[in-house]
Amino acid sequence: LLELVGREASYSFDDSAVKRLAELPALIAAITTSGLCLLVILGLTTAFGHPLSANQATVDNKAALSEETVARGHKLFFLHCAECHGFNGKGTDDGPDLYDLREGNALIRQVITGGVRREMPAFGKKLNDSDVQALIAYLRTLRNGRG
Amino acid sequence: MTALGWSRLHGAATHFPIALLFCAAFFDFLALVLHRSSSRVDYQAIGYWLVILSGLGSFVAVVSGLALTQWKLVGTGSLRQHHLFVWPAFALMVGLATWRSLVGKSPSRPAFIGYMTLLMATCAIVAGAGWSGGELLVR
């Protein structure tokens, strides 16, 4: 019986006052570390989050609102994308459906200009920045179900 | 690295800390419920290492995500929603991993109950971060 009680005691939680006292500084250290990490993140975003990306987003959003730009994007889509993604953008065996894209403009631009290895050619040399903006504007209309 | 590269790295890196955190919560919950079992110490040891690895993994996920979004702290729309989950989740994961690494595998029972409560809340917030992150990509 004594052996059983001893074994049970060794399995139970160590609730000694000393142990509890040691847990408080650990809590303070944990809160401090979390706070410091968030501060580092804030510093990184302030240092590297250049305003150009915000301007680019504004340009893209403005482009998306212009019907002329959308129409130009539609033409470019027919010329360069429809062969794989289908003339309605719904996709074919060679390329995915482009409706309801949730990716950000930066990633879409990167895919268009840089391509996807073994999956999609790069259009960076064929299309200039204005063309890519127009294409994104057209793709956004597909997202809105107007394409 | 290109935006697509960061996207792929972020996609690969985010799932590890999420899975590790959920597994840590599972094993620590077992330890709490089966506190009279001889396996409790083992469950707590597993929970201990998993939560620390999860905390370490969260740094890769966060840095790759920030690089992908061009270092936007909050952003707009769906990205903003994602970040509203991500930052509390990241702070909690780092805090929990730090506390656990300092107090060891087997804290006192009251402290462990408090830790478990916070761990469960963190799992819920991390789930929200994962869901909103998936919403950014799912078509």
Image (cartoon, coloured by chain):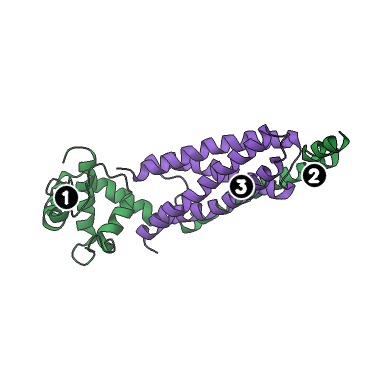
Chain colours: A green, B purple
Identify which amino acid the numbered label 1 is placed on. Thr
Which of the two residues, A90 or A137, is positioned nearer the viewer here? A90
Quarter of the image where the C terminus of chain A is located: top left
Q: Regarding mark 1 in the picture, which secondary structure is present there? A: loop
Please tell me which of labels 1 and 2 falls first in the chain.
2
Identify which amino acid the numbered label 2 is placed on. Ala
Q: Which residue is mark 1?
A: A92
Quarter of the image where the N terminus of chain A is located: top right
Chain that bears disc 1: A
In the displayed structure, does residue B117 sit left or right of residue B102?
left
Question: Residue at left 18%, top 55%?
Answer: A94
Q: Which residue is mark 3?
A: B51
Decide: few, some or many residues near mark 2? Use Cα within 10 Å; few <14, some 14-19, many ≥20: few
Identify which amino acid the numbered label 3 is placed on. Val
Chain that bears disc 2: A
Which of the two residues, A19 or B94, is positioned nearer the viewer here? A19
Quick check: do tags 2 and 3 share a chain?
A: no
Decide: few, some or many residues near mark 3? Use Cα within 10 Å; few <14, some 14-19, many ≥20: many
Q: Which residue is mark 2?
A: A22
Question: Looking at the picture, how far across and down is residue A76, in whole percent?
Answer: 14, 55
